[in-house]
Amino acid sequence: MDSGNMAWVLISAALVLFMIPGLAFFYGGMDRSRNVLNMLMMNFYCVLIIPILWVVIGYSLAQTPFDNSFIGGFDSFFLKDITAAGDGMSLATIAFLGMFAAITPALISGAVADRMKFSAWAIFVPIWFLLVYVPVFKWVYGGWLGQRGSIDFAGGTAIHVNAGIAALAAVMVLGKRRTAPTPPHSMPLVMIGTGILWFGWFGFNAGSALAANGQAAQAFMNTFLAGAAAGLAWILIEWMRDGHPTNLGAASGIVAGLVAITPAAGYVSGPAPILIGLIAGAICCYAVRLKNKFGYDDALDVVGVHFVGGLVGSLLIGFFANPAFFEGSFDEGIFYGGGAGLLVEQAIANGAAIVWSFVLTYIIMMALKKTIGVRVSPETESTGLDLAEHGETAYHGAQ
Amino acid sequence: MQLITAIVKPFKIDDVKDALKAAGIQGITVSEVRGFGRQGGHTETYRGAEYKIDFVPKVRLEIVVDNSEVDRVVEAIKAAATTGKIGDGKIWVTNVDRIIRIRTGEEGSDAI
């Protein structure tokens, strides 16, 4: 047993868990003051339901048996035959991966803010987890997409592209909010959330080496640099274009950079993380405006940041992958002597994830819409989801 | 000149603002206030314990207008702020003795 590896994976798992309140505050601060508790609850709910589903059936369907290319089986139902005997690394890894499973549907919450019925969200999350997250995860890690040669270090395709395109499908069914978007109700909360996310992301990316080794160290370095470069790119563009470098721009850029480096974290080195960060920050800074052009109400820019950032990062692996640096067995990117083969595989992998996630999410949301309904009443939307859905309000003023 | 004061539901303030703009009103002052009328408060639940929230959030508008405008403005606010449910608020009108625009020193109707 390598106690160093074990320690790092367990710590990383806890770091990824901490990203969920980070995400909740990041979104919650951007949201309206009358809906902030609903936003926090949508996020925290994911970490109530998903860990249980992950252990009962999710892990089994996502990873076993390992020779199936599309979906796992029931061999590890309730973690059957997985014990603490031996080095215990499989248990640590299952816990670590369970955190990823929990945060992925939480990402979607930012898009559906201000108008989705909590009962519909409560049903959407477990169904989406089983029908979308689990199969795509399997395809990417050990399934047909991975076997073809695409790579995804910590979940660019399996998590960010997957959740990002699902967010688009979800808001297409849900429809627009009844009132115009409002500015963030608490920018300090957004900045706290961003800081927590970045901190946790070191576990997300560097932990995905599943070992305390050089690849983890480089993934750590990449997570550091890409977040910085993307935040910098975003505020510089804002400064030149709009006249001011904003806190929300810095926060959005940092998250876009972290999303983009996620699939590449263990495969790129040298200047690549800085370039990936700069490119992703610049592209996402413009991508968040697409919703105005196309008229979908992605409230807190899950599509513009997570889908676009994840896709950019995943495709850039095709240029920047550097197996020599890692003594790795993956293909070289175009800038390191490889052909376009890796880029093509990255495109195929993302294309498959996009189609599956979009279509299935659309169907799940339509089914919910036709049965229990997905929207709160106009009255609730106006007076706030916090009181109507949760019986609580975030701010009471002087008591 | 008269001062029109209205207490309305917070989510109605945008509708009221749009109605007043459409009616040609050039300026309004709003403040977030709390209070209760016949609607009373509501209860929130924390760790199973119910808490009575007596003071409900409302928005207060204040507009000074010429006497000839009063009825029109009151009607505009009333139409825009109505939901038909209890707690829609109130409008009251009071006389204003003097009004001064600070920048120019203009008084009376010129200062509205």
Image (tube, rainbow, N blue to C red):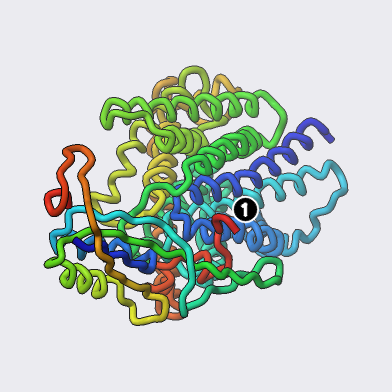
From the viewer's side, name the closer residue of A186 and A303.
Answer: A186
On the image, the x and y values in percent for residue B28 come to 26, 55
Q: Residues within 10 Å of mark 1 (few under 14, many from 20)?
A: few
Taking the image as drawn, is residue A345 in sight? no
Amino acid beneath label 1: Asp
Tag 1 residue: A67
x, y percent for residue A207: 66, 36
- Check disc 1 and report its element: helix, strand or loop: loop
In the depicted structure, whether residue A66 falls above or below residue A13: below
Q: Please tell me whether residue A82 is drawn above or below residue A130 in the rendered image.
A: above
Parent chain of label 1: A
- Nearest the viewer among A292 and A140 is A292
Residue with the most extreme front position: B97
Quarter of the figure that contains the C terminus of chain A: bottom right
Direction from residue A14 to residue A188 in the image, left or right = left
Q: Residue at x 58, y 24 (%)?
A: A221
Q: Residue at 28% across / 28% down in the picture?
A: A243
Nearer the observer, B49 or A220: B49
Can you tell which quarter of the image residue B85 is in? bottom left
Q: Position of residue A267 (x, y in %)?
A: 53, 29
* Residue A141 visible in the current orientation: yes
**In-image side of A10 versus B25 (left or right):** right
Residue furthest top in the image: A270
**The quarter of the displayed image where residue A32 is located:** bottom left
* Residue at screen point 47% across, 41% down: A187
Q: Residue at x 38, y 68 (%)?
A: B9
Q: Quadrant of the N terminus of chain A?
A: top right
Left or right relative to A138: residue A349: left
Number of numbered markers: 1
> Would residue B19 be found to the left or right of residue A283 on screen?
left
